Image (spheres, rainbow, N blue to C red):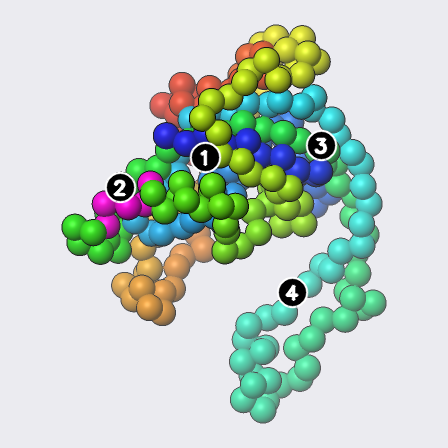
Amino acid sequence: MFKIIVEGDYACYTRPELKVERVSYDVPTPGALEGMLKSIYWKPAIRYVIDRIIVFHPIEFLNVRRNEVKDKVLLSAVKSRMNGKGSDPSIYTSESRSQRAAMVLRNVRYGVQFHFELTGLKCEGETDSEKKHYNILKRRLENGQYFRTPCLGCSEFPARKIELVENFDLSEIDERVRALGEVDLGYMSYRVEFQDGGIPLNGDWVHPKFSDRASTVYYRPRMVNGVIDVAQYREGVRC
């Protein structure tokens, strides 16, 4: 069991029904927090499970409008160019610009309680134990290490600080959050589950090919005085 404090200037946990003009959920989704943890330490042999989320700062939104690139470079176009065929695969922002609005969270601070489970995938025999992964993750959290910048929902909103703690000080929850009492957060995305289950379709871990087919799992949590007990809703998640 781990407990961390996560802070950031901005965050955006996009509602899937409003993804063109992005609008964030009021609180993080478990799936987004799992993705953040994978940026710190990830192996096929483990999966992260979020147990509790604490909202320390008031839920404040900010409306922003940005110029975004609406296209992406195609891998097939790059390979064709490398072989001396095809046209320039580059994207020029002046020709592929789209202005979009977004409603994002600002000045966020969350407490995240989580654990991990062994998946049995790509294990390294007896050396691939739960204790080994626990010690590696603990060390990386203590040293502030990561192999990809941990983000708060969207990659353009990096986490400013991630701190491993022994316990959460619930007295630090803002009074405005406490004043909300018990809040029904409505139906929220719990996580996205891929049909391949994390196993390469070609059975090759060196040059893996994964499926892009996935379904979203939803749940309906309640926040009580700033605390979301994710574990109690896990039995009721629905596709």
121 to the left or right of 154: left
Q: Could you tell me how far apart the alpha carbons at marks 1 and 4 are, in whole angstroms?
A: 27 Å
Q: Amino acid at mark 4?
A: Lys
Q: Give SS at disc 3.
A: strand
| Mark toward the start of the polypeptide (2 vs 4) | 4
* Residue that badge 3 annotates: 107
Q: Amino acid at mark 2?
A: Glu
Q: Give SS at disc 4.
A: loop
The range drawn in magenta is 128-134
Of discs 3 and 1, which sits in the foreground?
3
* Residue that badge 1 annotates: 217
Of discs 1 and 2, which sits in the foreground?
2
Q: Amino acid at mark 3?
A: Asn
Tell whether position 184 is magenta.
no
Q: Residue at x 73, y 60 (%)?
A: 69
Q: Quadrant of the C terminus?
A: top left
* Residue that badge 4 annotates: 72
* Tag 3 near tag 2, CB within 8 Å: no
174 to the left or right of 49: right
* Residue that badge 2 annotates: 130
Q: Which of the pair 92/124 is nearer the observer?
A: 124
Q: Amino acid at mark 1?
A: Val
Q: Give SS at disc 1.
A: strand
Q: 43 above or below 11?
A: below
Q: Position of residue 54 (x, y in %)?
A: 55, 23
| Mark toward the start of the polypeptide (1 vs 2) | 2
* Tag 3 near tag 1, CB within 8 Å: no
